[in-house]
Image (cartoon, coloured by chain):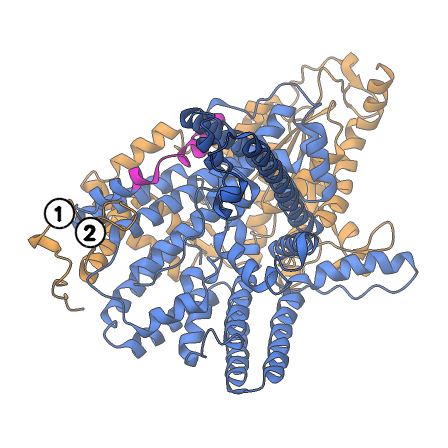
Chain colours: A blue, B orange
Amino acid sequence: MLFPTFTFAVFFAVVLTVGWSLHRNGAAWKLFMLAASYFFYGFWDWRFIGLIVLSTIVNQGFATVIDRSERDRARSSLLVTGVAFNLGLLGFFKYYGFFAESMGATLSRFGLPAPPMLQIVLPIAISFFTFQALSYIIDVKRRELTPAPLIDFALYLCFFPHLVAGPIVRASEFLPQLRVRPDPRRIDLTGAATLIGVGLFKKVVISSYLASAVVDPVFNNPGRHSSLELIAGVYGYAIQIYADFSGYTDIAIGIALLVGIRFPQNFNRPYTAASIQDFWRRWHMTLSNWLRDYLYIPLGGSRGGRNRRDRNLFLTMALGGLWHGAAWTFVIWGAYQGAGLVVERRLAEKASGVQVARRRRRIAMVPAGRPTDADATAAEVEDPYGLLDELGEPTPARSRFTERQHRWIGRFVTFNFICVGWVFFRADSLGDALHILWRIPFAWGAAPLVTPLLAATIATCLAVQFIPRALTRNALAGLSQLPAWVHGVAFGAFLVLVDLLGPTGIAPFIYFRF
Amino acid sequence: MAAAPPHPNQPHGARSRRTTPRARTSEGFRKRRPFRSDQTVGAALLALIVACLLGSQSLVNLAAHQPFGAQRSVALALANALDRVADGLSLDRPAKFVDRLTGRVPRGRVDVEALLQQQALDTADDTTSPLDINPATGQRYLSVAEPLRVLLAGDSMMNDLGPSITELAPVALASIDLDYRVSSGLSRPDFFDWPSHLAQVLDAEHPEAVVLVFGPNDFQNLEVDRKVLEAGSAPWLTEYGRRVGVVMDLLHRPGVTVTWAALPAMRDPEFSTSMATVSEIYRNEASNRPWVRVVELGSALNRPDGAYAATLPDSDGTPAALRQGDGIHLSRAGADRAAVLLWSDVSERWAVENAAGEARADG
C-alpha cells in the first residue's frame, strides 16, 4: 500500500477514526495499531508478516535475556548472537545475490565453482526494521533501556507510518510515547496536514516530473545526451531523490502526528549545507545518528588519534553506502562520502592550525600591556575571529562579509560534491557512472531535454531550501488559527491538485528498495 | 469518540481562536494552535469527501481500471454515482480546468477499424523512389542525415529493454523513441488504448522500425460488448488474437518493419504457461503478416530446455542474474541479452551495420 493512493487514504481514515476512539484504552489502542500495521505491511505480500513477527519475537527474546544477565561477558555474547541474527537475516534477503555474484566472479577466475544464485524476494522495509531492532537490543545491553512489553516492541518495529522507509526511530524515542496516552486535545493538525501535503507534492509532482523529464532518459542512456543534459540529469536527480525521500518522511511524520506519535526530524534543508559534514547532519539525519551511535563509536570513534578516527569515519560511510543497496555503486558512493569527510576534516584541521600559528605570531607583536598568548583561553584558540576582533582587524562587518562569502563557496562546492556522489548512487553500474562523469566536459551540443520548466523546477526546489524557517513556522502558526473544517476542505482540494499535476500511476518511493 | 474538554493550559476551539502574541516556542517562533481529536478526525474525513467529489473523475478511472468482475462493477457504480453528484454540483469543473491547463485532457480515441480500411487502400501508395531503396533489404538507405526512426513501445518490460536496445543502436544512424506504459497491454484499452495511441504516434513521428513487447499484463478477462470473456477461454483467445492482429495491421505501412517480442519463461509456472499462450498468439498472427517478425526472447533468457532461468553464465562463465525479484521483469544483464536479439532483427532488416560502416568510411 503506497501512501499516495486512494487505498491508503481510506485505510488511514479508518485507522485515524478508530484509533482516537480507542485512545482511552491503551491496550486496545496498541492492539488495534498493531493489527493495522500488519495489515498495511501484509498488503504487499502477506508472507512478509511472518518475517517481521519472527524478528519481533527473536529480538524481544534477546533483549529479555540480555537484561536478565548480570555478567558483562554473557551480555556481550548474547548481544553478538543477536546482532548476528539480525545481520544474517538482512544479509540473506538483501545481500545474498550481491555476494554470490561478486564471489562467483572471483572464484570462476580460479576455476572454482560459484555459489548458487537464488532468486530471493527482498522483503520491503527489512533494512529499516532490522536497524531499529538492532538499536533496541544494543540499548538494552548498554543498560540505556529496559525491555518493553512485547506488544510495545512489536508496535515499535512495525508501526505503519515509519515501517517502510523510515525515519529510523529509536526505541528510546518511540516506546516512552506508548506509555503515556497522547493528549487528544493537543493535535498539531496544521503541522501534520502541511507535512503530508508538501510530502505528497514533492513525491507525486516534483519527483515524478524530474524522473520522466530528465533523470531516467539521461541515466538510461548517457551516451545519447549532451553535456548540458547530463548536468541537468545529475542536478535533477539530486532534487528528485531529495523530493522523493524527504517527501516520504514528511508524509510519515505527518501521519504519525495525526495519530498522536512524534517522530524525529529526518531532513533539514540539506542542500543549504556549507560542508560535507554539515550535509550529513541534515540528510537522512536518523540514519546518520544511527551510524554514529551504533557503528562509528563502537569502531572507536575519534579515540586513538587522527588516523584511527579517519579510518572509522571512512568505514562507517562505506558500510552506510552498502546499507543503501546491494551493489558496488552504493559501496563506492559511501566510500566517496567517507573520503570526502576525511579530506574535509584534515583540511579544516590544517587551516585551523595555520590560523592558530598566525594568531601566535600576531600576539608576539602586540605591544606590552595588551593580552598575550598566556592570557588566551582555549575558547579563543578555537575562535580565530575572536582574536582578530580583539586586535581590531579586520572590522566585524568585513569579517561577516568574508564569512558569508566562504559559506556560499562552501555551499556551492558541497552541493556539487554531493551531486557527483549521486551519479554513483543512481547509475546502473560503475561503468555508467564514469561514462556520465567523463562525458560532461566533452559532449557539448543541443540539449532539447533542458526546457525552461525543467530549469525553473530545479532552481525553485533549491531556492526553497533557503526560505527562513521563521517565515514558514510563523505562516503555519497563522494558518492554525483557521477552523478545522477549513483545514479539511483545503487539504482535500490540495490532494486533488496533486493528483491532477502528477503522472498517471505513481512509481514506488526510491527508498523502498533500501 | 467523545469530544474532550478544553485543556486547561491551552484554550482552543470556539472559545479561543487566536493564540496570544506571547505564545511562542523556545526558538522564538509563533506557536501553532492545537486541535482536538474529534476536530482532527472530522477534518480528515471532510478532506476525503472533498477530494472524492472534486476528483470524482479520477475515482471513476481508478474503479474502471480494476480487473473485470463484481468488485469492479461495485466500485464503478459507486464512483459513477459520486461523479454524477459532483457533475450536478459542478464540483468537477476545477479539475477539468486544471486538466485543460496542463494539457492532460486525453487525446480522443482513433477509430482504428476505419483507419485500417483506409490504410488498405493506401498501402500501394508508396512514394519512396526506387533509387532510394536498398535492394538488399527492400528498405531505404540509412544515413547520418536521415537516421532510422525507431519506436520502442510496450509495457514495463520495454522499460527494462529500452535502454539496452538504445545502447546497441549507433547514435548517428538511429533516432530512438522509447514509449512504454507501466501496467498496460492489449487487454485493457480502457486503461491504455495502445491501438489509438500507436495510430497517433505513427502519424506524428513516422517511425520506421517498431519494436513491441506486450503480454505480462494481458492474461486477464476481456470485456467485449459488455460481455466478460474469461482469460484463456476459446472466445478470449479469438478476441485477443484479433486485437494483436489489429495492432499488426495498423503498423502495416510502407517502409515500416515490426519486431514483436515473444516472452521468455516466467518463474511462476502458471504465469509462464499464460505467457506461452499469448506468445503463441503473437506467432500465429505474425505468420501471415510478413512485415512482422516475432523474436523469441526465450532463446536468450531461458535454460536450454526452455525452462525459466534466474541466472545464466555470461561470456566469462560467471553466473549473471537475468531477472528482477518478481521473476518477470529483466535485470540489466537480462535486458542486455534480450536486446541483442531484438536489435539484431532491426539491424538486419535495415542494414544498419552496413550503413554504420559507410558512415565511418565517409568520416
Q: Quadrant of residue B95?
A: top left
Q: Quadrant of residue A438?
A: top right
Residue nearest the viewer, comparing B13 with B246: B13
Q: Secondary structure at mark 1?
A: loop
Residue drawn at 44 percent across, 33 percent down: A390
> Quick check: B223 left or right of A328?
left
Q: CA distance from mark 1 to mark 2?
A: 8 Å
Residue sitting farthest toward the right: A111
Marked residue nearer the N-terminal end (1 or 2) = 1
Magenta region: A454-472
Chain to which the residue tagged by mark 1 belongs: B
Q: Secondary structure at mark 2?
A: loop
Q: Amino acid at mark 1?
A: Arg
Residue A461 among those drawn in magenta: yes
Rendered location of residue A221, percent (x, y)? 67, 34
What is the number of the mark on residue B18? 1
Rendered location of residue B79, percent (x, y)? 30, 51
Residue B303 among those drawn in magenta: no
Residue nearest the viewer, comparing B46 with B183: B46
**Mark 1 in CB contact with mark 2 (< 8 angstroms):** yes
Q: Quadrant of residue A359?
A: top right
Rendered location of residue B211, percent (x, y)? 67, 37
| Residue under label 2 | B33
